[in-house]
Image (cartoon, rainbow, N blue to C red):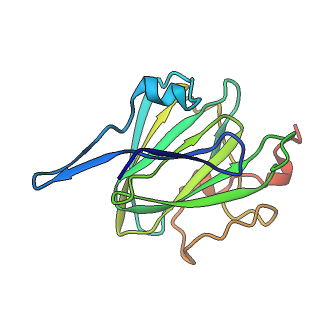
Amino acid sequence: MAFKVEKSDLEGVLLITPEVHTDPRGRFFESFQKDRYQEMGIKEEFVQDNQSVSQKNTIRGLHYRVAPEQSKLVRVIRGEVFDVVVDIRKDSSTYGQWRGYTLSDSNYLQIYIPVGFAHGFCVLSETAEFLYKVSEYYSAEKEKGIMWNDPDIGIEWPTSKPVLSEKDKINPAFKDLYSD
């Protein structure tokens, strides 16, 4: 599998497939290489790595961060998820649109999510381990969310029985995003 970068139709979002080397011992790949990723246009300095383990049907999100905003580089290291990116850039031609991608430990796909997007995922496998690099340190006061099932966005989540955090159950509607 050769290294490949594809642009999403949501401007700035990149789909990255690393070059994977396999042999009888197993597999090896570079999951991040600063110079190569900068050549792709990913200029941020990632300051923190986060890792979550979630059970089937868990939906985490839709999350975003206010100033200073946060970009992410995400991937799955065990299991499979349906990953969602929503454009929340008010002046964007794709404002309010979403795209979903399947990330797994067997397709190695990574998604670069620049500032100006909300992000979430739904676990498809029995469990999934999700890893993400972020460009800003965690701050509970700066982390925000949008209703996971907002009708104005219309995400087609692959579960009828979502498992949600208490916080994600009460996120506001998309239409209220810029009402302050």
Tell me the residue at 39%/29% (across/down): 33
User: As displayed, is residue 129 above or below residue 31?
Assistant: below
Can residue 60 be seen at all in this image of the molecule? no
User: Does residue 57 appear left or right of residue 77 in this picture?
Assistant: right
Q: Is any part of residue 150 visible from this angle? A: yes
Could you tell me which residue is drawn at 58 percent across and 53 percent down? 120
Residue drawn at x 41%, y 63% is: 80
The answer to which quarter of the image holds residue 136 is top right
Residue 19 place in picture, x, y as percent:
35, 45
Q: Residue at x 32, y 37 (%)?
A: 30
Q: Camera-side residue: 35 or 43?
A: 35
Of 74 and 35, the residue lying toward us = 35
Where is residue 24 drawn, in percent x and y? 10, 56
Q: Nearer the viewer, residue 119 or 180?
A: 119
Circle count: 0
Q: Is residue 79 left or right of residue 175?
A: left
Q: Position of residue 156 (x, y in %)?
A: 66, 71
Q: Residue furthest bottom?
A: 160
Name the residue furthest front: 2
In percent of width and height, residue 123 lies at: 46, 64
Q: Is residue 91 above or below residue 147?
A: above
Quadrant containing the C terminus is top right
Vertical side of 180 occupied by 119: above or below: below
The relative height of residue 22 versus residue 137 in the rendered view (above or below) is below
Left or right: 176 in relation to 165: right
